[in-house]
Amino acid sequence: MTQDSYGVFVEEDLRFQVGMCVTATWSHCGFTYQGRGEIVGLTQRNVAVKLLEPVGRLREYAADSVLLLPRIADNVTWSTQNCVRLERVERAGDVAGWKRRSNDGL
């Protein structure tokens, strides 16, 4: 990862807010998983993400499961394979081009 790409991760991390739609990436038992979710909690070192859809070949992670993933400030456990990324959108009305979950299922 270059310094420029690291800066993109830092910039996204600074934008995190509860209710934002994200893509969560994590590893477990040698397998890497990725799924869409919603930020439901934030601490200085972690992001709590509620999955919006089942994830895994066998759907090991059900929709509405909550994962606790590291923020970039946690330089011990954070990696590009264990992180949270914001979902970009092209719709008007979204804060700074980032998608926010609403009650209408968007």
Image (tube, rainbow, N blue to C red):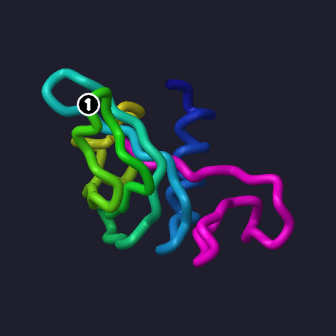
Q: Nearer the viewer, residue 1 or 92?
A: 92
Please report the residue visible at 73 percent of the width from the left and 70 percent of the height from the top.
Answer: 95
Where 21 sits versus 32, above or below?
Answer: below
Residue that protrudes farthest toward the left in the picture? 29
How crowded is the residue under tag 1: few (<14 C-alpha within 10 Å), some, or many (20+)?
A: few
Q: Nearer the viewer, residue 45 or 86?
A: 86
Per the image, label 1 sits on a secondary structure element best described as: loop
Q: Position of residue 53 (x, y in %)?
A: 42, 50
Left or right, 39 with respect to 65, comes to: right
Residue range corresponding to the magenta coloring: 83-106
Left or right, 86 with respect to 24, comes to: right
| Circle 1: residue type | Leu
Q: Position of residue 38 (x, y in %)?
A: 46, 63
Q: Main secondary structure of the magenta part?
A: loop
- Where's the C terminus, which quadrant? bottom right
The image quarter in which residue 52 lies: bottom left
Whether residue 13 appears in magenta in the rendering, the answer is no
Q: How many marks?
A: 1
The image quarter in which residue 59 lies: top left
Q: Which residue is mark 1?
A: 58
Where 45 sits versus 17, above or below?
Answer: above
Please report the residue visible at 31 percent of the width from the left and 38 percent of the height from the top.
Answer: 26
Where 97 sits versus 35, above or below?
Answer: below
Q: Position of residue 51 (x, y in %)?
A: 38, 55
Where 100 sits versus 7, above or below?
Answer: below
Residue that protrudes farthest toward the right in the picture? 92
Left or right, 37 with respect to 46, comes to: right
Residue that protrudes farthest toward the top in the picture? 30
Q: Position of residue 77 (x, y in %)?
A: 24, 42
Q: Nearer the viewer, residue 45 or 89?
A: 89
